[in-house]
Image: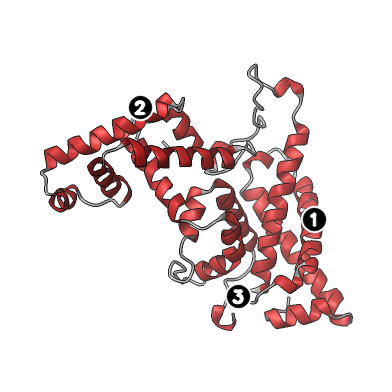
Amino acid sequence: MTERTHEQWLTDLKQEGPGRAQALEDLRARLERGLVYYLSRERSDLADRSADEIQQMAQDFAQDSLLKVLNNLNSFRGESQFTTWAAKIAARVAISELRRARWKDYSLEELTAEGEIMPDHSSSSSMNSGTSDQPESYTEKQDILKLIDEAIETTLTSRQREALKAHAIDGMPIEDIAAKMGTNRNALYKLIHDARLKLKRRLEDQGISLNYLADLFEIG
Amino acid sequence: MTKSDTAYQIDVILRKILAHAQSISCDDCYDVLDKYADMLRAGKDPSIILPGVKEHLIACGDCGDEFKALIAILETSSAPDTSNT
C-alpha cells in the first residue's frame, strides 16, 4: 500500500480523478483493518461475536467513518498524520455506534427492581477502566467532582487543605510537608487524617459513600 | 489495596479531582487527540506541547475510551514519522 503524505491524501481525496478511487479504497481498507483489531481485542462486550460479525461491523463502521472523513476534510489541520486523524474519527464512530446498538438490545427482563439497566451479560467491561456502561456516568462524575471540590474548599481548614493536597495530590514526602508547614510528622499525620475524615463525612452527609465513589471512578 | 482502605481511596479520588481541575475540556482533548497519539507513537513526550491531555484522559472515562480505541485502530499501521507534520 502506498504511503501518502497528508498533502497527497488531501489532493487525492478532494479531486475527481483516478487517484480518488484508489485513495478512498486505501483509506477504507486501512480503517477497516484497524477497526477489526479494535473490536476483537479491546471490546470484551463483543467477545461472543463471530469473526464474520466483527468483520461486518468493522466494514460498516469503516464506511461511516469514510463519509465523516470526506465531509470534514477541510478541518484537517495537518498537525498529525492524515491516517491518524482519520482513525480518530473512526474511533468515535465505532464507540458511539456500539453504544447506540447496545441500548437497543436491552430487554425489559434486564431491568433491575430499582429500574437500573443491567450491563450485557457477556460484558466484563469493569476490566476496561473508564468504559461507561451508562451514558450518564460522565455527567455523574462531573457532578461528583464538583461536590468533592467544594467539600475540600469549604469543609477543611486551610492547614488541613494544604496538608491533604500536598500529600494526596502532589505526593510530597511527609517530612517535606512537615518542614514546609512548620510542624512535626505526628501533627501532620493527624492533620491529614482529620482532613480525610471531614471529607468523608461531608460526602456521606450528601449521600455519597466511598464505595460509591470507588465504583464510579473504578478504584480498588 | 482493598476497597475498605479509606485513606487510599480518598487520595486516589483527590488525585483525579486535581487532574480534572487542571485539565482541558473533552472537546479540546478530542481536537488534539490525533496529534497526541502520533507523538506518543513516535516516542516523544507530548506533555509540554499538549499539557492537560494526559490528565484529562485519566480523569475522563469517555475520552480515555476514545483514546484507547484510537490507539487500537492505529495498531495495524506503522509508527508515524512526525518530521513532516
Quadrant housing the N terminus of chain A: bottom right
A113 in relation to A213, above or below = above
Q: What residue type is labelled 2?
A: Arg
Local SS, label 2: helix
The answer to whether any part of residue A218 appears in the image is: no
Residue A201 got which mark?
2
Distance (Cα) linking label 1 and label 2: 51 Å
Quadrant housing the C terminus of chain A: top left
Q: Which amino acid does label 3 sit on?
A: Glu
| Chain-order first, disc 1 or disc 2 | 1
Tell me if mark 2 has few (under 14), some (14-19) or many (20+) residues whose alpha carbon lies within 10 angstroms of its own: some
Distance (Cα) linking label 3 and label 1: 27 Å
Q: Which chain carries label 3?
A: A
Q: Name the residue under label 3.
A: A79
Local SS, label 1: helix
Local SS, label 3: loop
Q: Mark 1 points at which residue?
A: A59
| Residue B76: percent from left, percent from top | 64, 64
Say if labels 2 and 3 share a chain: yes
Distance (Cα) linking label 2 and label 3: 47 Å
